Amino acid sequence: MSNKAINRLKAVLAEQGKTNKWLAVELNKNETTISRWCTNEVQPPVETMLQIAELLNIDIKELLNSTK
């Protein structure tokens, strides 16, 4: 799979003034995992994306890049 930017996690965290470390603590995940999600090296499961959207108080669609 290519490193196409599927999620906007890094941008949304920056927009809200949140850090990878903050998200790692909130989700009880390793900071390295969060970093890999932010660089689109790997993608979080849909359930986790929903959790992230709820934590950031946004629609899950805001975490994804449009395919159109």
Image (cartoon, rainbow, N blue to C red):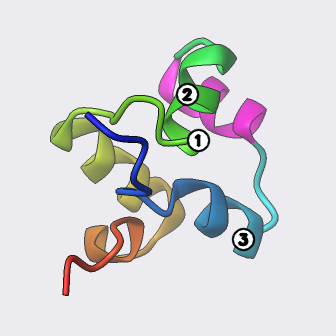
* Residue 61 falls left or right of residue 42: left
Dots 3 and 2: beta carbons under 8 Å? no
Image check: 51 left or right of 55? left
Q: Are marks 1 and 2 in contact (CB under 8 Å)?
A: yes
Residue on which disc 1 sits:
39
Amino acid under label 2?
Answer: Arg
In front of the other: 4 or 58: 4
Farthest residue, direction front: 2
Query: Which residue was labeled with disc 2?
Result: 36
Q: Is residue 49 left or right of residue 45?
A: right
Residue 25 percent location from the top left of the image: 65, 25
Provide residue 7's location: percent of width, then percent of height.
40, 57
Identify the residue at horizontal 26%, vertical 52% (top origin): 50
Compared to residue 46, the image places residue 24 above or below, namely above
Q: Residue at x 48, y 54 (%)?
A: 55
Q: Amino acid at mark 1?
A: Thr
Dot 3 crowding, Cα within 10 Å, few <14, some 14–19, many 20+ = few
Which badge, 3 or 1, is on the more N-terminal residue?
3
Tell me the magenta residue range: 20-28
Is 34 rendered above or below residue 14? Answer: above
| Residue located beneath label 3 in the image | 16
Circle nearer the viewer, 3 or 1: 1
Relative height, residue 59 to residue 56 (above, below): below
Q: Looking at the rendering, in which quadrant would you find the N terminus?
A: top left
Q: Main secondary structure of the magenta part?
A: helix
The local crowd at label 1, few if under 14, some if 14 to 19, many if 20 or more residues have their Cα within 10 Å, is: some
Q: Is 21 contained in the magenta span?
A: yes
